[in-house]
């Protein structure tokens, strides 16, 4: 009897071992097949992202002029930026430009979404018209606003003069006090439809039952907006704000076409200062260092956005 039980135990162990070996072999095959399918994407990421990024880090640590070989100097370019008063002004301008523009785009986008939500007829036509600033090429937008803010022939000066608001021409783009406001207005005008359309889509996803229940309880329009609409749009607001912040930080066309970073350094931002250092002063190492100095902030925003989306899921 004991021998029979012993033989049965051996056969069971052999079957389990065989099944485990076959299962492990199948899993190993699946892993290999999965890596085989993913390998082209991994190669593409390494070729298009990892290599250029690592090479940019190397260039930022060299003294590189156009037409001359690079000479490794370590962190000298970054130390120079820490002492550079122009770079300090660029950081300040970039923060003012980004925070002010994004905040205004959020407010205007919300107003646009609330207005379109109340419209019954012609909603699609109005939505298409309001999307025009976002669809028009950025260079066209910058040229249009440059003409409108022109100190002599600009539409804004001519209109204000005829209305009697001002008594003489104002050089909007020629004085530091108004140049930054002018480029911010152009950026806001181009970007707020993105927020408006995103907020409108988010409002359609909020259950109507919540608003009906709030009406039964006697809630006002403001209370429904604060207690239902804003919490329902929390995810959309976070995502659109972070995306717009990244794009606004890297905005080049509007600022360069309208003011080229001037007058002086009044509207110099990261993109324009990088262009000036790299393509006008021909200091590629220092120009790349300026660009990479923005990388930690952008990386933080991307990581924050990714973790927020994963947490929401």
Image: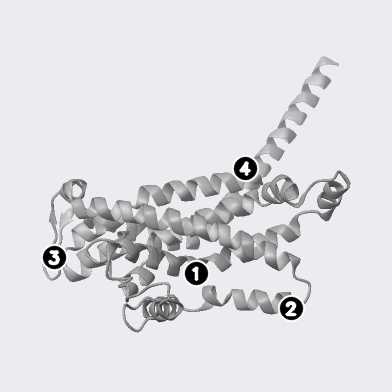
The image's mark for residue 65 is 3
Q: CA distance from mark 1 to mark 3?
A: 38 Å
Label 4 close to label 3 by CB (< 8 Å): no
Q: Crowdedness of circle 3 by 10 Å Cα count: few (<14), some, many (20+)?
A: some
Q: Which residue is the site of mark 1? A: 189
The image's mark for residue 273 is none
Pick out the residue farthest to the top: 2
Q: Secondary structure at mark 4?
A: helix
Label 2 close to label 1 by CB (< 8 Å): no
Q: Which residue is the site of mark 4? A: 311
Q: Secondary structure at mark 1?
A: helix
Q: CA distance from mark 2 to mark 4?
A: 38 Å
Q: Which residue is the site of mark 2? A: 122
Is any part of residue 193 visible from this angle?
A: yes
Label 2 close to label 4 by CB (< 8 Å): no
Q: Secondary structure at mark 3?
A: loop
Q: Earlier in the sequence, mark 2 or mark 1?
A: 2
Q: Crowdedness of circle 1 by 10 Å Cα count: few (<14), some, many (20+)?
A: some
User: Which residue shows up at 61% across the image and 78% down it?
Assistant: 129
Q: Nearer the viewer, residue 138 or 175?
A: 175
Q: Is residue 34 above or below residue 156?
A: above
User: Which residue shows up at 84% across the image and 45% down it?
Assistant: 218
Of circles 1 and 3, the one toward us is: 1
Q: Tell me residue 45's x, y (percent).
A: 44, 60
Is any part of residue 54 visible from this angle?
A: no
Q: Earlier in the sequence, mark 2 or mark 3?
A: 3
Q: CA distance from mark 2 to mark 1?
A: 22 Å
Left or right position of 8 against 129 = right
Q: CA distance from mark 2 to mark 3?
A: 57 Å
Q: Is residue 114 above or below residue 157?
A: above
Q: Tell me residue 49's x, y (percent).
A: 39, 60
């Amino acid at each position: 009897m004991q021998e029979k039980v012993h033989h049965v135990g051996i056969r069971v162990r052999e079957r389990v071992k065989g099944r485990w070996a076959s299962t492990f072999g199948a899993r190993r095959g699946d892993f290999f097949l999965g890596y085989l399918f993913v390998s082209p994407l991994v190669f593409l990421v390494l070729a298009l992202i990892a290599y250029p990024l690592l090479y940019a880090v190397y260039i930022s640590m060299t003294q590189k002029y156009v037409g001359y070989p690079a000479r490794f100097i370590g962190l000298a370019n970054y130390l120079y930026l820490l002492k550079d008063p122009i770079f300090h002004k660029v950081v300040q301008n970039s923060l003012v430009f980004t925070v002010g523009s994004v905040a205004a785009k959020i407010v205007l986008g919300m107003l646009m979404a609330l207005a379109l939500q109340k419209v019954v007829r012609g909603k699609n036509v109005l939505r298409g018209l309001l999307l025009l600033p976002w669809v028009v090429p950025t260079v066209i937008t910058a040229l249009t606003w440059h003409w409108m803010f022109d100190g002599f022939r600009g539409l804004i000066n001519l209109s204000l003069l005829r209305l009697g608001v001002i008594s003489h021409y104002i050089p909007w783009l020629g004085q530091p006090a108004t140049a930054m406001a002018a480029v911010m207005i152009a950026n806001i005008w181009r970007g707020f439809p993105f927020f408006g359309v995103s907020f409108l889509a988010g409002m359609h996803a909020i259950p109507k039952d919540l608003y009906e229940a709030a009406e039964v309880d006697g809630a006002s329009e403001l209370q429904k907006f604060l207690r239902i609409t804003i919490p329902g749009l929390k995810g959309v607001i976070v995502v659109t704000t972070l995306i717009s912040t990244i794009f606004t930080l890297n905005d080049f066309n509007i600022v360069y076409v309208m003011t080229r970073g001037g007058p002086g350094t009044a509207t110099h931002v990261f993109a324009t200062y990088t262009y000036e250092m790299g393509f006008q002063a021909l200091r590629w190492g220092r120009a790349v260092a300026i660009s990479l100095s923005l990388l930690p902030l952008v990386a933080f925003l991307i990581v924050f956005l990714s973790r927020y989306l994963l947490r929401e899921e």
